[in-house]
Image (tube, rainbow, N blue to C red):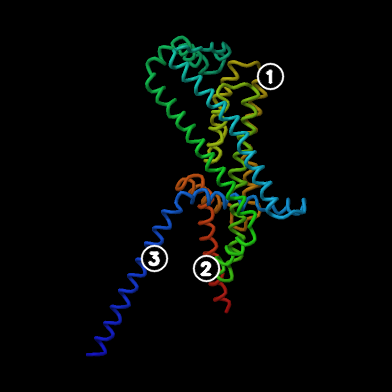
Amino acid sequence: MKPIDEASRVFVNNMVESAIRIGLIFILVWGTYHIVQPFILPVLWGAVIAVALNPVVNLLTTRIKSNRTVAATIVTVASIVILIVPFALISTSIYDGLMYLTNMVTSGELKAWTPNVAIKEWPLVGERIFDGLTYLTLHIKELVVQFLPQIKMVLTKMLSTFGSGLGSLIMFLLSLVIAGVFMAASQPISNVVTQVFERSAGDHGKHWANMLANIIRSVLVGVIGVAFIQSAIISAALFTFHIPAAGLISLLVLVLCIAQLPAILPLLPLFGYMYMTADTTSFIIFTIWGLLAGLADNILKPILMGRGSVVPMPIVVIGSLGGMMFAGIIGLFLGAVILSLWWGVFMVWLEAEQAEKIK
C-alpha cells in the first residue's frame, strides 16, 4: 500500500503545484490585459497601417538613399497631413451644417423650396409627388413644430457623433505614430513575427506570415482605399455643385462604403433635388458624375482586393464583412486574417491527406 500512498501524494502535490502555477499565470495575463487594454486598438491599427505602408517605405528608402527611420518619418508625416486636411474640411462643413440646422429648427426660420412643375410630367406618380412636395412646402413650419422634440433629439445625437469622431481622429493619429515606429523597425519586428509563425506552424510559418501581410494590404486597399476613393469623388461632386450639407453627406458616403453598402444610396434623393433646383446641364453632369462614382467599387474592388493574395477572394470578403459586423472597422482585417488562417490550416490538412494517399 505504501507505493500507492506515495504515488497519490506525489499526484496531489503535482496537481496543487500546477493549479497554483496556472492561477499565477492567469493573474499575470489578466493584469497585463487590463494594463495594455487602452493601447490594443491603436496598436492593432498601427500594425495594419505599417503592413500596408511598408512597401512605400521600402521604395522611398531606395529612392532617397536614406535609412528607414527617415523614410518612415516622411511617410508618417505625409499620412497625418493627408488624414487631417480632408477631415478638417469635411468636419467644418458638417459642423456648420449641423449648427445651421439647429438654429433654423430652434428659431423656426425655415425656408421651403418650390417644387419644379416638371415633376407633374413624370408618368404615373408625377402628380402625386408634386402634390406631396407642395403640401410639404406650404406646411413645413407646422410639421417641424409638431415633430420638434424628435428633430432636436436627432440633431443632438448627430452633434454627439461629430464629437466622438474627433476622438476617433486622435486615436487614428496615435495609430499612425505607432505605425511609423513599426515601419522604422520593420526588419526586427518581421523576424520576430516570422519566428512566432514558424514556432506555431512549422515549415508553413514563413509562408503564412507573408500570406497574412498580403491579405492585410489587399483588404486595406480593396475596402478602405476604395471607400476613400469613392467618397472623395462623390465629395468633389457635392462641393462643386454646392449641395446643402455636403460634408455630412460625404461622411455618410464614406461610412456606407466602409460598411460595404452601396454608395449610390444617399445620391438618389440628391438626383431629385438637382432635377428640381438646378438647370438641365448641371443636373445631367451631376447625375453622370454620381452614377460613375457610386458604381466605381464594382470595378475597383475585384482589381485591388484580389491583388497579391493567394487566398480566394470570397474567403477574404466573407472574413472582412463578418469581422466588421463582429468587431467594427478593425474587424475588417481581423476577420479576413482569421478566416484566411483557417483556410491555410484546411489546405495544409488537405495536402497532407493527399500525400498520405500517394504514399
> What amino acid type is highlighted by mark number 2?
Ser
Q: How far apart are the alpha carbons under marks 2 and 3? A: 20 Å
Q: The N terminus is located in which quarter?
A: bottom left
> What amino acid type is highlighted by mark number 1?
Thr
Residue at x 65% of width, y 42% of height: 299
Q: How crowded is mark 1: few (under 14 residues within 10 Å), some or many (20 or more)?
A: few
In front of the other: 271 or 119: 271
Provide the residue designation for mark 2: 200
Q: Earlier in the sequence, mark 1 or mark 3?
A: 3
Q: Earlier in the sequence, mark 1 or mark 2?
A: 2
Residue at the extreme top of the image, as rendered: 138
Above or below, 155 against 127 in this view is below
User: Position of 299 compared to 175: left or right?
Assistant: right
Q: How crowded is mark 2: few (under 14 residues within 10 Å), some or many (20 or more)?
A: few
Q: How far apart are the alpha carbons under marks 1 and 2? A: 62 Å
Q: How far apart are the alpha carbons under marks 1 and 3? A: 70 Å
Residue 127, given in percent of the width and then of the height, sits at: 50, 13
Residue 148, given in percent of the width and then of the height, sits at: 39, 18
- SS type, badge 1: helix
In front of the other: 22 or 220: 22
> What amino acid type is highlighted by mark number 3?
Ile
Marks 2, 3: nearer the viewer: 3
Provide the residue designation for mark 3: 25
The dot on residue 281 is 1
User: Position of 273 compared to 20: left or right?
Assistant: right
